[in-house]
Structure formats: C-alpha cells, structure tokens
Image: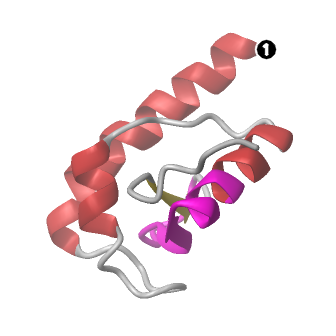
C-alpha cells in the first residue's frame, strides 16, 4: 500500500489561449485529491509545473472562479512555461 502525503497540494487551472479572460481554478485539493489531479493531468498529457507558493495562493480561490489580479504575473509565467514545454514536446 502506498502512503499518501496528506500535505501535498495540487491546483488545476483552465486557460484558453487568445482570450482576454483570466485563467480559472478548475480543481484543487490536498493529499489523495492532489494525487488524483496530478494523475489526471498526466493521463491527458497536461504539462505540470511545480510551484508550492503559487499553489498555496491559488488554493484560496473558489472553484470555477477566475484568478485574482494579484496572481496574474505569477500565473502568466506558468502559462508561458507550459506553452513552451508543450511546443518543445511536439
């Protein structure tokens, strides 16, 4: 039996490239929920960025809410990383 780290945190964002809408939080959770979020992302080929401080800040955003303006810059850096990693993987 694998021990689950109950302190692990994962937050999933949805962002449509080319829109003016801010990304929104689509999933978040600790422990087993975090592991399931990560496993689902991996199954679908979603690039994962590990950023504990940003995940903690985003965990305070309600599900389906857009990210707050204070987090735009940090999230933009993650989006740039994901887009670069995705285009390099092709």
Q: Residue at x 50, y 73 (%)?
A: 25
> Residue extending furthest front?
1
Query: Which x, y percent locates residue 31?
Result: 53, 60
Mark yes or no: residue 15 visible: no
Image quadrant where residue 42 sits: top right
Q: Is 84 situated above or below 49?
A: above
Left of 37 or right of it: where is 31? left
- Residue 75 appears in the rendering: yes
The residue drawn where x is 42% and y is 70% is: 22
* 9 relative position to 46: left or right: left
Q: Quadrant of the C terminus?
A: top right
Q: Position of residue 19 (x, y in %)?
A: 54, 64
Q: Residue furthest left?
A: 70
Mark 1 secondary-structure assignment:
loop
Q: Residue at x 34, y 46 (%)?
A: 76
| 7 magenta-colored | no
Q: Residue furthest right?
A: 43
Range of magenta residues:
18-36
State the image quarter where residue 79 is shown.
top left
Q: Where's the N terminus, which quadrant? A: top right
Q: Please tell me how many numbered marks the rendered image carries.
A: 1
Q: Which residue is mark 1?
A: 90
Q: Closer to the camera, 37 or 89?
A: 37
Picture quadrant where residue 16 is located: bottom right
Nearest to the observer: residue 49 or residue 76? 49
**Looking at the image, is 9 positioned above or below residue 63?**
above
Q: Nearer the viewer, residue 51 or 83?
A: 51
């Amino acid at each position: 039996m694998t021990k689950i780290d109950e302190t692990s945190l994962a937050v999933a964002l949805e962002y449509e490239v080319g829109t003016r809408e801010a990304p929104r939080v689509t999933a978040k959770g600790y422990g087993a929920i975090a592991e399931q979020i990560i496993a689902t992302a991996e199954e679908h080929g979603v690039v994962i960025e590990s950023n504990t401080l940003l995940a903690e800040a985003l965990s305070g955003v309600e599900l389906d809410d857009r990210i707050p303006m204070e987090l735009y810059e940090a999230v933009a850096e993650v989006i740039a990383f994901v887009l670069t990693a995705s285009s390099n993987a092709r």
